[in-house]
Image: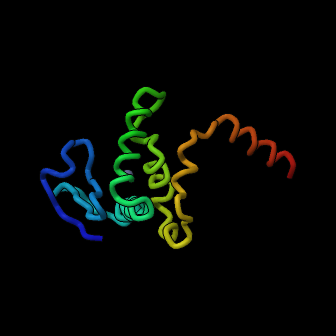
Amino acid sequence: MKIVRSRYLPPLRRHVAINLFGVFFVHPNVHVNERLINHERIHTAQMRELGYLPFYLIYLIEWFIRLVMKGNAYLSISFEREAYRHENDFDYLSRRKHYAWVKYLKKKNKKKRERHKKSKNNNG
Ligand SMILES: [Zn+2]
């Protein structure tokens, strides 16, 4: 993954890095660690399977939709949810299935998941 240090990309200060067409732009003072690189590699995999332009189009559309929904719009985008969920799993990309981000389109019901976990534990 090509890493470019830039004062201008990403344009917003609150974001430390941006992946544009597989090139990773990061502000000069940001520490680039393996977790961050893995996060961006997951985005590159998403881009490659969709085609770059459809990726950015879907990303923007989903972000606009999530703006009117409950919670943080950026963190709720399916591409981000997959990347954040697996950024500490350094083998993830070797076993990742194509279009794995699709399952993150649907918001998981936290209460339902906890209930399921409890009933599983109760059953042994
Ligand atoms: Zn991301």
Residue 35 in view in this figure: no
**Residue 19 appears anywhere in the view:** yes
Residue depicted at x 22% and y 57%: 26
Residue at image point 45% right, 52% down: 84
The residue at the point 75 percent across, 42 percent down is 116
Q: Residue at x 77, y 42 (%)?
A: 118
Q: Position of residue 46 (x, y in %)?
A: 43, 59
Q: In this picture, is 117 found above or below 64?
A: below
22 horizontally vs 89: left or right:
left
Looking at this rendering, what residue extends furthest in the right direction?
123
Direction left: furthest residue: 7
The image quarter containing residue 111 is: top right
- 67 and 33: which is toward the camera: 67
Q: How many labels were placed on the picture?
A: 0
Left or right: where does residue 16 sit relative to residue 105? left
Question: Is 114 displayed left or right of 5 in the figure?
Answer: right
Q: In the rendering, at what x and y percent does residue 4 appear?
A: 19, 64
Up-down: is 112 above or below 84?
above
Q: Quadrant of the N terminus?
A: bottom left
Q: In the rendered view, how is the structure colored?
A: rainbow
Identify which residue, 47 or 93, lies in the foreground.
Answer: 47
Q: Is residue 75 above or below residue 6?
A: above
Along the viewing direction, whichever of 33 and 2 lies nearer the viewer = 2
Instruction: Where is residue 110? Give x, y as percent.
Output: 63, 37
Locate residue 62, reporting x and y percent: 42, 40
